[in-house]
Image: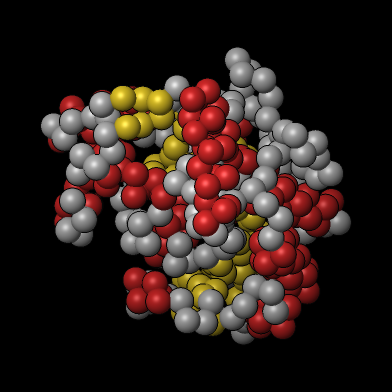
Amino acid sequence: MGKTLYLLTGATGFLGSNICAQLLERGEKVRAFVLNGDKTVKYLPEEVEVFYGDLCAPEDCQKFFDVEAGIETVCIHCASMVTVNPEYNEKLVKVNVGGTENMLAAAKAHKECQKFVYVSSTSAIPEVPKGQRIKEVKEYYPCDESKVVGWYSLTKAMATQKVMDAAKDGLNACVVMPSGILGPNDYAIGETTGTIIKIIKGEMPIGMAGSFNLCDVRDLAYGCIAAADKGHKGEAYILANEEVTLKELCTLLDKDLHCGTCKFYLPLGLAKKLAKLMEKKAAKKGTKPLMTTFSVYNLERNNSFDYSKAKKELGYKVRSYVDTLHDEALWLKKEGRI
């Protein structure tokens, strides 16, 4: 065997598309798992082999792994359903947990699969008190649901544990756990990119206190590929950055672009009260609230992560927020978004 085919799910997403680009840059062959009707497939480079399927269909996952004799495969399972709604959602469990189980079963059934990398999330790790840095743990599920908050986080914890169990059973699998994502090439314009656009355009007069942990998407993509190259079997790796506040992000953007900053930053205690009122009003009207108690929790929680293990074992590096925001602004200008 000598030829390797990279099997990539979530290839049309923000992180997946950057993983795909970096694999192609180094001369790898990529097969992308794409959901039927996904319009962002048009952004995939033409040299990518597109496989249409559904993660919830075990037979699709099995076919995705089928290759000719003499070809080895490496799977990076990046696809997942993301939501900021903390409530139980059956589809969320089917896609994030069931879909991962289907991919693991396919990897186990195809002996030419040399490595399986699951892209989890730092939200799957139990939170520790502020002042301490959150580290990888030995077991992800079952977990204390007061420390792994919301059903998206719980599904990522469940799926992470499935991968860890598969590694114990012999599969050469490891896990990467990214924090938030920032940077250029976000064609779907996700929540963070949308916020950056609003700040640059002066459409966010009021911000909030609290913190985020955001990584350059290109650094995360590098970390995912490094895990495929040299991540150890049965290990998890946090891919994070230093904490940053909205005020700090605004100040960095203003220094670079002279776009101004938020006029006022809402204290979290007040934000929480307002969010509760907005949720009550929205529930009566049957609409979505502008702000939720869960979104305030995400700003209030401990967002300090220890990513030293990934630095040491994977050669993971993070670039500065200054560089990432500058590159993102250049890309947004080029795309006519600002």
Describe residue 265's horizontal placement relative to residue 243 as left or right.
left
Visible residue check, residue 243: no
Above or below: residue 312 compared with residue 337:
above
Q: Residue at x 61, y 31 (%)?
A: 309
Q: Is residue 277 visible in this depiction of the protein?
A: yes
Residue 67 in the image: state x and y as whole percent: 62, 81
Rendered position, 64 above or below 283: below
At horizontal 36% and vertical 25% (from top left) the residue drawn is 265
Judging depth in this view, the residue of 77 and 206 nearest the camera is 206
Query: Looking at the picture, does residue 39 appear above or below residue 139?
Result: below
Q: Position of residue 78 (x, y in %)?
A: 56, 59
32 versus 257 height, above or below: below
Residue 118 rendering spot, x and y as whole percentages? 64, 55
Farthest residue, direction front = 284
Write the residue at 23% across / 29% down.
Answer: 261
Residue 183 horizontal side relative to residue 180, left or right: left
